[in-house]
Amino acid sequence: MTARNIIPLALLGSTALALVMPTTTHAAGFVEDAKVTLGLRNYYFNRNYLNGTDPVIRGERQGQAEGWTQNFILDARSGFTQGTVGFGLDVLGLYSIKLDGNRGAANTQLMPIHDDGQAADQFGRTAVAAKAKISKTELKVGEWFAVLPILRADDGRSLPQTFQGAQLTSNEIDGLTLYGGQFWKNSQRNDASREDMSFGGVKGDDFNFGGGEYRFNGNNTMVGVWHARLEDVYQQSYVQLTHSQAVGDWVLGANLGYVTGKEEGAAKAGNLDNKVYQGALTAKTGNNSFMVAYQKLSGDTKFMRIDGASGGTLVNDGFTNSYDNPEERSWQIRHDYNFAGLGIPGLTLMNRYVSGSNIDVYTNGVKTRENAEEWGRESELAYTIQEGTLKNLSIRWRNSDVRRDVGADLHENRLIFNYPLSIL
């Protein structure tokens, strides 16, 4: 039996003992600090393909992608048993039901798609993770919704993506958080299975990562350094600097980052070369927030991320596009408004525009075009009920347009209802 198998079995066994032991002071934290919520998510998705750019599915042009689902997300997190070593357990129960959408659902990524092109009627999975804590250091082993700068699970459709692996997080030094670990399996947002970690459809071995974030200056400044390897496919490093500063009635912020990636080990995906230089500047005053961002890629490979993972590390990542093509340069302008300033708390509006240019296009590894362009416009109107029986029910309408020299032109609408029920 390998060390990878021994660790989770040991943790799960210790956790099982904590669950069955009598109610004593040793187990008090396990229950008293537990939190259980049931998220009810209703998701409608409609994407219209424009200008004859719609994909061909089983010999027919799709025209549009449309689907509607009802989803249940049970998030149960225990506290830790008391003692030198505390043990705990986290459970994520995920279940999705199709309300509408057959062949037209093929590109919604709301549900799994069968071989005949039809969307599944339902799907789901259960993610379980055992955890142990000593002082301010925690070990977690199992499957969960992992969000790290070097690997971000995607939660942009019916159910969230999850990864299976082990992670160590330490906060022993004030202001410094250290991370290290390994992920073995990937469950994408529209899939009930657990697959090997992969990039561009090329399967690697384990995904190893390490990193640290140091916060200082009253937590206003953060420096992060990360490194990851998808064994035999790619390796990637990321350096980030964030800062916020109050200046009179304004709060100014900056998010600067540099990413570099290349092939690793057996290089199953071939020679890889990618660098990202990026920066976002923000300004907030009253109920208004403004942002301008610039993102520059170099090399003949797009931004490297595990298949299905979010591109949220990139400053120009959005609902429909990440502007992460080889050699692409993109800039963004964004405005957010909180209607609390007009006496409507809970109502917000976001608008952003992103323009990308200088794109290199590759077909079967051969460059077929240079200097391609694309642009996108996205808006989100959101309202969260502030009081009453339906308090915390949120409603989001996302409206987007994308136009490209190469690829699909889109007009898209999404309507998302989220209602969190606190069970414990």
Image (spheres, helix red, strand yellow):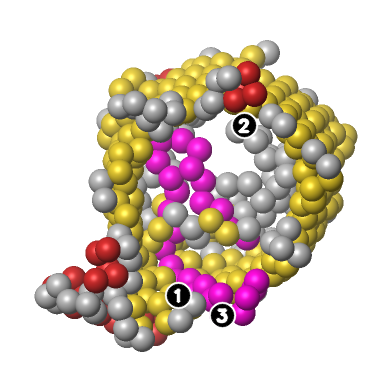
The segment highlighted magenta reads: 150-176
Front of the two marks 2 and 3: 3
Q: Are marks 2 and 1 in contact (CB under 8 Å)?
A: no
Q: Is residue 345 left or right of residue 20?
A: right
| Image label count | 3
User: Which class describes the residues within 10 Å of circle 2: few (<14), some (14-19), or many (20+)?
Assistant: some
According to the picture, the residue beneath numbered tag 1 turns out to be: 138
Residue 151 part of the magenta-drawn span: yes
Please give left or right for residue 271 compared with residue 49 in the image.
Answer: right
Label 1, label 3: how far apart the Cα atoms are: 10 Å
User: Where does label 3 land, which residue?
Assistant: 172
Choose between 245 and 227: the one closer to the eye: 245
- Of labels 1 and 3, the one closer to you: 3
Whether residue 392 is visible here, answered yes or no, is yes
Disc 2 marks which residue? 320
Residue 220 lies left or right of residue 186; in this view the side is right
Amino acid of disc 1: Glu
Are there few (<14), some (14-19), or many (20+) residues within 10 Å of tag 3? few
Camera-side residue of 14 and 114 = 14
Instruction: Tell me where residue 248 appears, x and y as whole percent.
Output: 83, 42
The quadrant holding residue 110 is: top left
Task: Work out whether mark 1 precedes mark 3 in sequence or the reverse, and give the earlier one.
Answer: 1
Amino acid identity at mark 3? Glu
Looking at the rendered image, the quarter that the N terminus falls into is bottom left
Q: Amino acid at mark 2?
A: Thr
Q: Earlier in the sequence, mark 2 or mark 1?
A: 1
**Element type at marker 2?**
loop
Q: Residue at x 33, y 34 (%)?
A: 40
Residue 65: x and y in percent read 49, 21
Q: Secondary structure at mark 3?
A: loop
**Residue at (45%, 75%) from the top-left corner?**
138
In depth, the one of 217 and 185 nearer the eye is: 217
